[in-house]
Amino acid sequence: VQLVESGGGLVSPGGSLRLSCAASGFTFHYYVMKWYRQAPGKEREWVAGVTRDGGVRDYAESVKGRFTISRDNRRRTVYLQMNNLKVEDTAVYYCKAEAIGSDTVYWGQGTQVTVSS
């Protein structure tokens, strides 16, 4: 099982990044997919989630209106489009797969996003 995030980097405030999380080794479309982030010295926090068919999306208040989560079940990939980035969005971003009706979860290794002028 693997979840591999990519797309992080250094961006100026107001800029955009698109994160990707490519899945392998499990039945991707059976899993709810979520993005989390962890800033230095802080707890890991939930950012966004999308249902198995992509039909329902939800966001933390801090990113609502700026971030968009999506998934492509044929490509086994979940995305996080991040616009109007702020310094406080700086964190390591992780994707997570959650099975419905069981305790099975998978985490990626994370990708660093740094927002700085």
Image: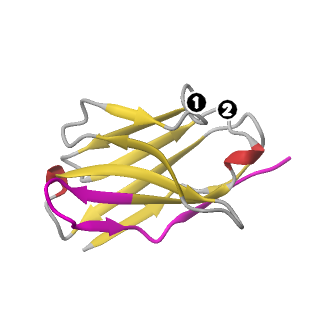
Q: Position of residue 77 (x, y in %)?
A: 31, 52
Q: Classify 56 as above or below 31.
A: above
61 within the magenta span? no
Q: Give the residue number, with chain letter if any, for mark 2.
A: 84
Closest to the observer: 10 or 30?
Answer: 30
Q: Residue at x 25, y 35 (%)?
A: 54
Numbered disc total:
2
Tell me: 30 left or right of 90: left
Q: Residue furthest top?
A: 65
Q: Residue at x 30, y 42 (%)?
A: 71
Q: Residues within 10 Å of mark 1 (few under 14, many from 20)?
A: some
Q: CA distance from mark 1 to mark 2?
A: 6 Å
Q: Are marks 1 and 2 in contact (CB under 8 Å)?
A: yes
Residue at (13, 60) in percent of width and height: 27
Q: Is residue 101 left or right of residue 60?
A: left
Instruction: Check disc 2 and give the amino acid type.
Output: Asn
Q: Which residues are magenta?
A: 96-117
Q: Would residue 81 appear left or right of 62 to someone viewing this image?
A: left
Neighbours of disc 2 within 10 Å: few (<14), some (14-19), many (20+):
some
Q: Quadrant of residue 79?
A: top left
**Secondary structure found at label 2:** loop
Task: Find residue 80 and report its horizontal and vertical position in percent.
Answer: 46, 43
Point out which mark residue 66 bears.
1
Residue at point 21% right, 66% down?
Answer: 103
